Image (spheres, rainbow, N blue to C red):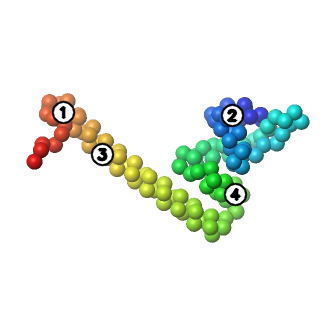
């Protein structure tokens, strides 16, 4: 498939797909006229790349991880890197959960304020 079709099927911009190729995240064959041609597996690969980006991984880290994900090739260094990335994501999740809990508290106070007319701030001591 050509780059425009891959972009449409994945919801990723043509510019992003070119970036992926420049950073060795995605490979394309070239037609005799120089157009990029992608195989059927490109859709799944782009979706995987998007998921890894969404988890906060850098292009460089994704390049290092893809052989393990795609081919099953792993090294002790890669396993260490994967574990470190997972720890980082866990920390980010914990921070987001804390933020959600604080928002829940603010929502509860605001809801009580609307019902009772009392300030949603805790009384000063």
Q: Which residue is mark 1?
A: 113
Question: Which numbered mark, 2 or 3, is in the foreground of this view?
Answer: 2
Number of the label disc, if any, that sits on residue 102: 3
Q: What residue is shown at x 53% (from left), y 62% (from top)?
A: 84
Badge 4 element: helix
Distance of label 4 from label 3 (alpha carbons):
40 Å
**Which of 40/101 is in front?**
101
Question: Which numbered mark, 4 or 2, is in the foreground of this view?
Answer: 2
Q: x, y (%) of residue 105?
A: 26, 43
In the image, farthest residue toward the bottom:
76
Q: Which residue is mark 2?
A: 14
Number of the label disc, if any, that sits on residue 67: 4
Evaluate if marks 1 and 2 touch, with contact meaning CB atoms under 8 Å apart. no
Upstream in sequence: badge 1 or badge 2:
2
Residue 16, located in which quarter of the rendered image? Answer: top right
Upstream in sequence: badge 2 or badge 3:
2
**Residue 69 visible at all:** no
98 sits left or right of 64 in the view: left
Distance of label 1 from label 4 (alpha carbons):
55 Å
Residue 6, located in which quarter of the rendered image? Answer: top right
């Amino acid at each position: 498939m050509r780059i425009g079709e891959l972009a449409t099927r994945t919801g990723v911009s043509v510019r992003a797909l070119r970036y992926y190729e420049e950073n060795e995240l995605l490979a394309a064959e070239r037609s005799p006229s120089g157009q990029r041609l992608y195989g059927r597996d490109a859709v799944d690969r782009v979706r995987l790349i998007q998921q890894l980006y969404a988890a906060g991984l850098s292009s460089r880290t994704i390049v290092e991880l893809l052989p393990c994900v795609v081919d099953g090739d792993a090294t002790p260094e890669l396993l260490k890197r994967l574990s470190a990335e997972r720890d980082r994501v866990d920390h980010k999740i914990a921070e987001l959960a804390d933020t959600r809990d604080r928002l829940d508290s603010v929502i509860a106070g605001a809801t009580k304020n609307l019902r009772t007319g009392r300030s949603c701030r805790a009384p000063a001591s």
